[in-house]
Structure formats: structure tokens, C-alpha cells
Image (spheres, helix red, strand yellow):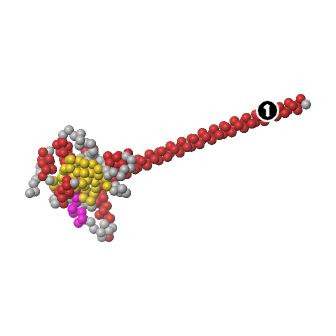
Amino acid sequence: MCICFSLTIDLKGFLLLLLVIAVLHTLDRQGEYVARTDFLWKAKLKVEQEEVETMRGINKILLENILPAHVATHFLHQERSTELYHESYSCVAVMFASIPNYKEFYDETDVNKQGLECLRLLNEIICDFDKLLLKPKFSGIEKIKTIASTYMCASGLRPGKEDGAMDEKHTEEHNVTILVEFAIALMSILDSINRESFQRFRLRIGLNHGPVIAGVIGAQKPQYDIWSNTVNVASRMDSCGVMGRLQTTENTAKVLMAAGYECECRG
């Protein structure tokens, strides 16, 4: 009787021990599962965050290729708004640089692959013009757009910089003269391309300065542009200009002469 009772106690103790071991094992496995799940979740979250940062960086690069850097920053950090984005400036220099004899070169015959080779050369010219803007010296110049074989750009489109300018005349002079230097650099690049491609392209450049309104229009394909009589007159300076020369308005010529440039009156 005592032996049976002892065996019963030993069996109960053994079963209890097995139960404790089973519970501890289950808890251990559960803890391991939770830790593994947590690790995988954190790893997945990290990957997703890196993908988001990568996409944000790509979006920023793409947006900055479409819009000026300060405008791209505005749209990246501001909540979506239906309000029209615009800027007003009292003194911006505007330049149109066209290649009038490009249309004589353009040909859609089979020799030029229906105009593809002509377009390829124009793309090379515009790309070389764009590369100039990467130089620190020309960092204040903003390319606005290209219209066929005409390159449009402006200097002085920097929000907040005008208000803090101590010397308005110095700012005016800088905006105008830096575009003249840019125009000279464009001519030099085009001469180099002419030598390599055996062409005779020449630039005809129009320049003016004054107040402008800048802004972004469009939703699906937003475009940054500038508007004012200043822009219209700069375009006319180009269209009625002379190939190989830079034509400006009288007021802009006065700024250039004060800066040491020689100007010739066309009458």
C-alpha cells in the first residue's frame, strides 16, 4: 500500500514536471517566435523606409530637373495646395539665344533619317549649353525653356535675395553682366561644335532686364515660366537682332556700358 502510494506521488510529480517543462518550452518558443517576428518586422520596416527615402530622392532629382531648386523645395515640403505658386521680382535679366540658320540645316530626307540626325545635333548643342549652368559662376542663371532652336534663360530669380540686397544697382549690374558672360560662353561652345560637325551655326541673342512675374502652371506637367513686358521685349531683341551679335534695349545697354562694356547703337 505504501509502495503504491509512493508510486502515485512520484507519477504525479513526474507529470507535473513534464507539464512545467512543456509550459516553459512553449513560452520559450513563443518568445523566440515573437523576437523573430519583431526582427523580421523591423527589417521589413527598414527596407520600406529606405525605399521611401530612395523614391523621395528620385522624386527630388526629377522635380529639380523640371523646376528650379527653390521651387522644387517648396513643392516637396509644402502640403498639397490649390493656390497658384508665384514670385514677383523687380529686376531680372532675360535672354533669348536662337540659332536662326538651324532651320536651313534641318532636313527630313532619308539621309538624315527623317530629321533624326538633325535633332541629335540640336540635342547635343542644348546639352552643352545646359552643362555651362553647372559652373559655380553661372549658378545664378536659371534655364526657363527651349523653344525649337531658341534657348531662354534668366538671371536674378532667387526669392528673398532681392529684399536683402544692399545695393540695387550692383544687383542689377550683376544680373545683366552675368548673362552677357553666359552668352559669350554659349558662342564659344557653338563655335567648338561647328568645328567638330563641320557646320556654320551662329547665335542671335536678345537681352533685356526689368520686372517679371514667375510661377508654376499646370498640374500633370507643371512648368516654371516667367511673364512680363520685360520678357516680350527680350524676345523681340532676339527676333530683330543680327546673327553673331547680342542686341539689348537702351536701358540694358546703359547698365553694360557702366560696367565697362562697349555697345553700338543700331539707330
Note whether 102 is above or below 72 in the view shown: below
Note whether 31 is above or below 253 in the view shown: above
Q: Position of residue 241 (x, y in %)?
A: 16, 59
User: Which residue occupies the foreground of this view, 119 or 70?
Assistant: 70
Is 104 inside the magenta-drawn segment? yes
Image quarter (top left, top right, bottom left or bottom right) of the C terminus: bottom left
User: Which residue occupies the foreground of this view, 43 or 159?
Assistant: 159
Q: Which residue is mark 1?
A: 13
Residue extending furthest toward the bottom: 109
Q: Residue at x 27, y 61 (%)?
A: 148
User: Which residue occupies the foreground of this view, 238 or 90?
Assistant: 90
Is 52 inside the magenta-drawn segment? no
In the picture, measured across the screen, residue 126 lies left or right of residue 170, that is right
Q: Residue at x 12, y 48 (%)?
A: 254
Q: Residue at x 32, y 46 (%)?
A: 70
Local crowd size for mark 1, using a 10 Å CA cut-off: few (<14), some (14–19), many (≥20): few
Residue extending furthest toward the left: 267
Q: Secondary structure at mark 1?
A: helix
Quarter of the image where one finds residue 13: top right
Q: Position of residue 56 (x, y in %)?
A: 42, 47
**Magenta span:** 97-105
Q: What kind of residue is marked 1?
A: Gly
Quarter of the image where one finds residue 32: top right
Q: Residue at x 15, y 53 (%)?
A: 248
User: Which residue occupies the foreground of this view, 254 or 243?
Assistant: 254
Q: Position of residue 42 (x, y in %)?
A: 54, 42
Q: Is residue 16 visible?
A: yes
Residue extending furthest toward the top: 2
Q: Is residue 95 visible?
A: no
In the picture, measured across the screen, residue 122 lies left or right of residue 9, that is left
Image quarter (top left, top right, bottom left or bottom right) of the N terminus: top right
